[in-house]
């Protein structure tokens, strides 16, 4: 069964507008972490933001924020004020078993974001 | 500066040949990972290791093997390459156990099996 689901294969957004990329996950472990990575056309993987399952507040990093809804098992990435350089593939990832030293990280299929001028 | 490198960056091989992809990191991270990236599948975990002499199978380990003889290196071997193993392979490393440690990725190796 898929543990990380990204239902939007591709999305378009107008420059300067906000966009939400969806991510749902499946785990029975109470201690886990959620990550978002960006992969531009050049191919490298860039870490964006992290949310722990016990974190009380939604994570934010500059124009990136994570809309964490624990009961719904969703961890959507919100990009505010989109820029042309935000055009890329975005991956959601999960690490389970944080309180037992877990480090194995699995990824979703990704969402390709296109920012229009 | 610390980094993680992969070699070769591009490789074409024939079906049935043994192929080894190298991964070397200078972060001194205990945790290392191999993923393959295919359209529609994202990144799928092949093998991972939390330290010297430790290796674990991931989601798609059939046909692949790894060994960890030191902290810096985790080579990935395709015992008998198949066309289904044509993919882009990423190596990654991370610090520590659990927690918010992000992964640092290598630049990737594009492997074509003909």
Image (spheres, coloured by chain):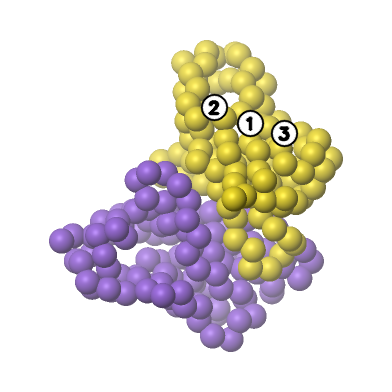
The reply to whether the C-beta atoms of the residues labelled 2 and 1 are less than 8 Å apart is yes
Q: Which residue is mark 1?
A: B22
Chain A in the picture: what colour? purple
Chain under callout 1: B
Q: Position of residue A13 (x, y in %)?
A: 23, 64
Residue under the point 76% across and 71% down: A99
Q: Which residue is mark 3?
A: B66
Q: CA distance from mark 3 to mark 1?
A: 10 Å
Q: Along the horizontal axis of the image, is A101 left or right of B13?
A: right
Residue under the point 24% across and 60% down: A84
Q: Along the horizontal axis of the image, is B60 left or right of A18?
A: right
If you read the primary sequence from the N terminus, does the residue marked by circle 2 or circle 1 appear first? 2
Q: Which mark is residue A37?
A: none
Residue B15 vertical placement versus A31 (above, below):
above
Same subunit, tags 2 and 1: yes
Q: Along the horizontal axis of the image, is B49 left or right of A76?
A: right
Q: Which mark is residue B8?
A: 2
Element type where label 3 sits in the image: strand
């Amino acid at each position: 069964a898929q543990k990380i689901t990204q239902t939007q294969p591709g999305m378009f957004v107008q420059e300067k507008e906000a966009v939400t990329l969806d991510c749902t996950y499946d785990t029975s472990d109470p201690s886990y972490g959620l990550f978002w990575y960006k992969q531009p056309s050049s191919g490298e993987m860039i870490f964006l933001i992290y949310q722990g399952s016990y974190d009380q507040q939604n994570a934010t990093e500059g124009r990136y924020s994570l809309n964490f809804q624990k009961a719904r098992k969703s961890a959507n990435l919100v990009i505010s004020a989109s820029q042309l350089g935000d055009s890329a593939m975005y991956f959601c990832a999960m690490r389970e078993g944080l309180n037992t030293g877990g480090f194995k990280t699995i990824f979703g299929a990704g969402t390709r974001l296109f920012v229009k001028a | 500066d610390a980094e993680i490198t992969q070699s070769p960056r591009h490789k074409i091989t024939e079906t049935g040949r043994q192929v080894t992809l190298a991964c070397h990191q200078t972060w001194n991270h205990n945790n290392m990972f191999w993923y393959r990236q295919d359209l529609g599948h994202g990144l799928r975990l092949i093998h991972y290791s939390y330290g010297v002499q430790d290796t674990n199978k991931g989601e798609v380990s059939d046909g692949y093997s790894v060994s960890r003889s030191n902290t810096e290196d985790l080579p990935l071997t395709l015992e008998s390459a198949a066309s289904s193993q044509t993919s882009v392979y990423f190596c990654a490393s991370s610090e520590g156990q659990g927690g918010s440690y992000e992964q640092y990725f290598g630049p990737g190796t594009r492997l074509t099996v003909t």
